[in-house]
């Protein structure tokens, strides 16, 4: 089975990119299914189901969606095998710019939109830096100059990435992305595979339920800001 991770900030066009690309594959890589990871809620499952794709949803709740992803992705492969899928696409909304779902030996795609501002590519972190392919959507609603600077900044943040411009409304770019998807590496399971980036554990008092503010309540993994020459 081929496994592909598609990550990116909310509403950049991940689902649109997946649906347009999959439609162009016309079964070349076997039946395709999707697992959608999000934090609190999603309606993507209904959209994928309407397109005839088997889909399962994982909501991370209080956890970082990428930590939740890596704790569950192997079970998703088991599900996909039972469904006899040829391709499993894992769509995850990257809400935490410190983490990333990309796994060694698995095709990793990061979707960003050109609307998000030309400095965004270097703010996104490992989700973009460690992707094999960076897809840029919504180029249709920015100027030519912004499109070019944005693409340049993406390539600077991740010099090894294949950068694909994609229009999620028309499907322009789907043939190019489909070509790469159809060649994604085959994997049997992920037991023993490694993430490309060690995710920060970030267990601070507020991660474990603290709500009170002030130094008496900030024990453990707390990092304080520096205010230059103004003593605190
Ligand atoms: N103009 C324009 N709109 C786009 C493009 N790609 C996607 N959209 C629109 O952007 C909105 C969000 O698209 P989705 O595909 O749902 O985005 P997503 O990243 O899957 O969203 P979440 O999974 O909810 O985080 C929709 O209204 C799409 O029609 C594009 O290239 N150009
Ligand atoms: Zn989506
Ligand atoms: Zn995280």
Image (spheres, rainbow, N blue to C red):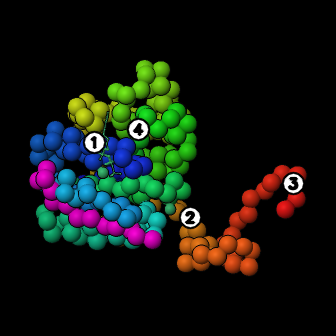
* Residue 190 counted in the magenta span: no
User: Residue 109: where, in percent of width, then height?
Assistant: 37, 46
Residue drawn 56% across the image and 69% down it: 201
Residue at label 2? 200
Does 118 sit above or below residue 29?
above
Q: What secondary structure is marked by label 2?
A: loop
* Residue 54 counted in the magenta span: yes
Residue at label 4? 113
Image marks 3 and 1: residues in contact by CB distance under 8 Å: no
Residue at label 1? 17
Ligand 3 has an atom within 8 Å of the beta carbon of the residue at disc 2: yes
Q: Is residue 232 left or right of residue 124?
A: right
Q: What secondary structure is marked by label 1?
A: helix
Cα separation between marks 1 and 4 = 11 Å
Cα separation between marks 1 and 2 = 29 Å
Of pointers 2 and 4, the one earlier in the residue sequence: 4
């Amino acid at each position: 089975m081929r496994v592909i991770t598609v990550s990116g900030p909310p509403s950049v066009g991940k689902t649109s990119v997946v649906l347009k690309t999959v439609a162009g594959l016309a079964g070349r890589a076997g039946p395709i299914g999707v697992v959608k990871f999000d934090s609190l809620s999603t309606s993507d499952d209904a959209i994928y189901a309407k397109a005839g794709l088997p889909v399962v949803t994982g909501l991370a709740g209080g956890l970082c969606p990428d930590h939740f992803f890596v704790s569950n992705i192997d079970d998703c492969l088991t599900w996909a095998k039972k469904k006899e899928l040829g391709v499993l696409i894992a769509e995850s909304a990257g809400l935490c710019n410190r983490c990333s779902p990309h796994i060694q030996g698995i095709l990793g795609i990061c979707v960003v939109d050109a609307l998000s501002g030309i400095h965004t590519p270097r703010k996104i972190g490992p989700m973009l830096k460690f992707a094999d392919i960076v897809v840029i959507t919504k180029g249709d609603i920015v100027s030519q100059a912004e499109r070019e600077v944005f693409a340049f900044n993406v390539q600077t943040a991740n010099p090894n990435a294949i950068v694909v411009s994609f229009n999620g409304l028309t499907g322009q770019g789907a043939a190019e992305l489909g070509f790469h998807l159809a060649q994604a590496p085959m994997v049997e399971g992920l037991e023993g595979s490694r993430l490309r980036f060690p995710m920060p554990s970030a267990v601070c008092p507020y991660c474990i339920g603290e709500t009170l503010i002030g130094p008496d309540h900030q024990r453990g993994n707390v990092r304080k800001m520096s205010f230059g020459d103004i003593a605190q």
